[in-house]
């Protein structure tokens, strides 16, 4: 696959539940059609020119060298490192990216730095041998494969994501799920309870609405819909003893 180099890797993120992050790939072959905030951001700042360029990812070839330089300087400031905010660390079908991600996680863990991972790919079972404080997550907005093929065409099937996450849970790892961006009924009719039931084994659930989408904002009762969904997530998590976080802006008056 194509590669690029960068001057820096680790940086402080402004995301509400994040600390430090790293993005060792430019682009994402999952090609999400939500639309994708990461793609919109990179296009806005001229990092990619089109969707077609975005879905042909480029790996940052000097990632590990940068970590060797930056970890000693920053490790006293870092509470955790998120992989990733503008790409996917376990991009489905890209073994070179998977290998780089595992190597980066092990390098951070060796310095005593916890990693928090989020993917629409398949989490490798090898992660079970990494730092036990790590947190492994998947994005799961539906269980309907036709919807996945429409909205996340290059991502891993939902069933495979859940199975890999559960395998890590069985091995004693901390697991979580991001149910974001959750679609309104005019995009797909589904039962949120079915999704929640499929992930009742996890330690944490994050729930958030769909943003930047005219179809959602044109759905007349979208505010009421998200308020009800958020309440359902909270009730489910409290009943199951699961930690939860409702993203800012999901609940409205």
Image: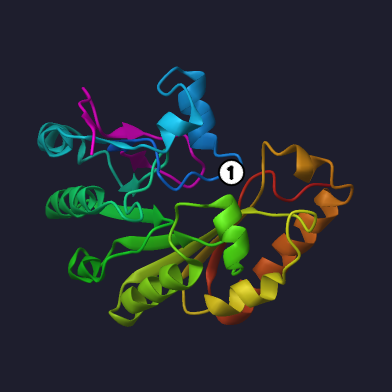
Residue 115 within the segment the image draws in magenta:
no
Q: Nearer the viewer, residue 134 or 84?
A: 84
Q: Nearer the viewer, residue 13 or 182?
A: 182
Closer to us: 128 or 88: 88
The quadrant the N terminus occupies is: top left
Q: Is residue 227 visible?
A: yes
Q: Is residue 130 left or right of residue 181?
A: left
Q: Taking 166 as reference, is 53 above or below it?
A: above
Which image quarter: residue 198?
bottom right
Residue 215 horizontal/vertical position (percent): 77, 43
28 to the left or right of 190: left
Q: Which residue is the site of mark 1?
A: 33
Q: Position of residue 237 (x, y in %)?
A: 60, 73
Q: How is the image coloured?
A: rainbow
Q: Position of residue 125 (x, y in %)?
A: 25, 71
Q: Is residue 180 visible?
A: no
- Residue bounds of the magenta highlight: 1-22
Instruction: Kindly identify the residue that appears in the image at 23 percent across and 54 percent down.
Output: 95
Number of disc labels: 1
Q: Main secondary structure of the magenta part?
A: loop
**Disc 1 crowd, CA 10 A, few/some/many (<14, 14-19, 20+):** some
Q: Please, is residue 155 above or below residue 191 in the view?
A: above
Image quarter for residue 161?
bottom left
Spot the residue most to the right.
220
Q: Residue at left 48%, top 47%?
A: 17
Residue appearing at x 47%, y 65% in the figure: 157
Give the x, y percent position of residue 219: 84, 47
Picture layout, residue 59 above or below residue 189? above
Relative to 223, is 28 on the left or the right? left
* Helix, strand or loop for disc 1: loop
């Amino acid at each position: 696959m194509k590669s690029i180099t960068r001057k820096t890797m680790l940086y402080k993120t402004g995301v509400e539940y994040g600390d430090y992050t790293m993005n060792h790939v430019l682009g994402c072959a999952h090609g999400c059609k939500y639309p994708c905030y990461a793609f919109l951001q990179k296009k806005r700042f001229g990092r990619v020119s089109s969707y077609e360029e975005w879905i042909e990812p480029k790996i940052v070839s000097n990632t590990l060298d940068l970590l060797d330089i930056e970890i000693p300087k920053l490790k006293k400031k870092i509470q955790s490192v998120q992989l990733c905010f503008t790409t996917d660390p376990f991009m489905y079908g890209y073994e070179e990216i998977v290998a780089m991600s595992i190597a980066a996680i092990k390098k951070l863990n060796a310095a005593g730095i916890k990693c928090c991972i989020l993917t629409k790919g398949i989490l490798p079972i090898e992660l079970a041998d990494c730092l036990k404080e790590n947190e492994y997550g998947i994005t799961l907005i539906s269980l309907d494969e036709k919807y996945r093929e429409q909205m996340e065409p290059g991502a891993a099937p939902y069933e495979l994501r859940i199975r890999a996450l559960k395998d890590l849970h069985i091995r004693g790892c901390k697991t979580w799920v991001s149910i974001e961006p959750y679609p309104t009924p005019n995009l797909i009719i589904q039962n949120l309870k079915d999704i929640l039931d499929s992930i009742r084994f996890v330690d944490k659930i994050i729930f958030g609405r769909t943003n930047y989408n005219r179809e959602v904002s044109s759905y007349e009762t979208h505010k009421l819909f998200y308020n009800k969904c958020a309440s359902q997530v909270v009730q489910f998590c409290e009943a199951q003893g699961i930690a939860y976080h409702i993203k800012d802006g999901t609940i409205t008056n």
